[in-house]
Image: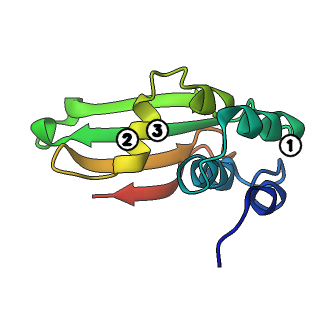
Amino acid sequence: MQLGFRDVQMLLLKPKLNVLLNLIGLHYCLNNLQVPAFHITEALWSGKIADRQVCVKWRSTDNFRTRGGDQSRCVYLKDLVKGEDDGEVLTVLERGPTYELSRVQVSDPFSGSGDEHELITII
């Protein structure tokens, strides 16, 4: 069973959900459904989640042994759709760990507990 754009909009692009679930919906719309960015942006604004932030941290395999090799970006959902970060974060999310990346972590910077709430940590 494949979800359509309206299904994702009703189920995953809601303000009561964690931003990480919103990100899954956004990613699914962009990559699996190939919905035009304009429609996704409209859905983010109408769902009142366009200004929510998600943080992505990754480590290059070149810097696997050193702590200083981590890179991270915190971006708004609306900026992910528009490619405001030059597509860097979406590229990391699409590729996941490869021969170039040894670790990818996605977190909610405002989870309320003080600690980052990890959704995905792939080593």
Indicate the quadrant where residue 66 lies: top left
Camera-side residue of 30 and 19: 30
Q: Position of residue 111 (x, y in %)?
A: 66, 46
At label 2, the amino acid type is Val
Q: Is residue 120 above or below residue 30?
A: below
The answer to which of marks 1 and 2 sits earlier in the sequence is: 1
Contact (CB < 8 A) between labels 3 and 2?
yes
In this figure, which residue is indicated by the disc labeled 2?
92
Question: CB atoms at circles 3 and 1 under 8 Å apart?
Answer: no
Q: Nearer the viewer, residue 21 or 2?
A: 2
Q: Check the image and report above or below for 60 versus 96.
A: above
Q: CA distance from mark 3 to mark 1?
A: 21 Å
First of labels 3, 1 by sequence position: 1
In the rendered structure, which amino acid carries the disc numbered 1?
A: Gly
Q: Position of residue 118 (x, y in %)?
A: 51, 54
Position of 109 with respect to 11 (left or right) is: left
Is residue 49 among what the camera can see?
no
Element carrying mark 1 = loop
- Kindly report the distance in space between the C-alpha atoms of the residues bearing marks 3 and 2: 5 Å
- Point out residue 93 in the picture as x, y percentages from the top left corner: 43, 46
Give me the disc on residue 47: 1
Quarter of the rendering occupied by the C terminus: bottom left
Q: Which mark is residue 97?
A: none
List the residue tagged with mark 3: 90
Name the one closer to the observer, 100 or 74: 100
Residue 101 in sight: yes
| Residue neighbourhood size for the residue with mark 2, other residues' Cα within 10 Å, grouped as few (<14), some (14–19), many (≥20) | some
Residue 40 falls left or right of residue 82:
right
